[in-house]
């Protein structure tokens, strides 16, 4: 298996852990000093874990891999992201509405673990689809 294939396999494990809500498995895939950056914040796992928990438990976020591209230590992922607002999250009560959008993440893999992760998605579209208005 090539380095690129091994790195893609790590990203697929990340997606599976995220989709099953297994935050401990997510943590195990990250270096202790892994930096995670997305539209809702940047930091180490302990800072990002509450955000991920609300996305998973509140919005029911699921990632469907559409494409993985790897070159050396870098893996780019394009997803279809879906979810249904089913539990309180980010200071809002659930609306029961669902959403679907395109999301992208880039990963730097070092020694078989995620060293850095950058995520981008249209969070404004997500909020509109979920029926969340700014206050």
Image (cartoon, rainbow, N blue to C red):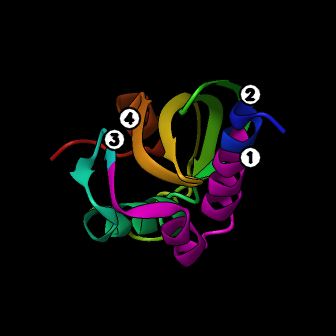
Q: Residues within 10 Å of mark 1 (few under 14, many from 20)?
A: some
Numbered tag placed on residue 66 in the rendering: 2
Q: Label 4 belongs to which residue? A: 123
Mark 2: secondary structure: strand
Of the two numbered discs 2 and 4 in the rendering, the one whose residue sits closer to the viewer: 2
How far apart are the two marked residues, 1 and 2, measured between alpha carbons? 14 Å
Identify the mark nearer the N-term, 1 or 4.
Answer: 1
Q: Label 1 belongs to which residue? A: 9
| Secondary structure character of the magenta stretch overall | helix
Q: Residue furthest right?
A: 1
How far apart are the two marked residues, 2 and 3, measured between alpha carbons? 19 Å
The residue depicted at 47 percent of the width and 61 percent of the height is 30
Asked if the stretch drawn in magenta spans residue 86, the answer is no
Mark 3: secondary structure: strand
Identify the mark nearer the N-term, 1 or 2.
Answer: 1
Above or below, 114 relative to 125: below
The residue depicted at 60 percent of the width and 72 percent of the height is 25
Is residue 18 left or right of 126 when viewed as pictured? right
Q: Label 3 belongs to which residue? A: 38
The residue depicted at 70 percent of the width and 32 percent of the height is 4
Mark 4: secondary structure: helix
Question: Is residue 11 visible to us here?
Answer: yes
């Amino acid at each position: 298996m090539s380095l690129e294939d091994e790195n893609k396999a790590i990203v697929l494990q990340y997606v599976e852990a995220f989709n099953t809500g297994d935050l401990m498995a997510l943590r195990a895939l990250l270096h202790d000093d892994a930096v995670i950056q997305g539209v809702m914040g940047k930091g180490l796992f302990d800072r990002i874990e509450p955000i991920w928990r609300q996305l998973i438990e509140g919005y029911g976020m699921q990632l469907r891999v559409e494409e993985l591209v790897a070159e050396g230590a870098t893996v780019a992922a394009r997803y279809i992201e879906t979810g249904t607002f089913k539990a309180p999250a980010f200071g809002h009560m659930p609306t029961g509405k669902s959403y679907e959008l395109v999301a992208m993440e880039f990963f730097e893999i070092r020694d078989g673990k995620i060293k850095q992760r950058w995520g981008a998605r249209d969070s404004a579209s997500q909020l509109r689809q979920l029926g969340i208005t700014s206050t």
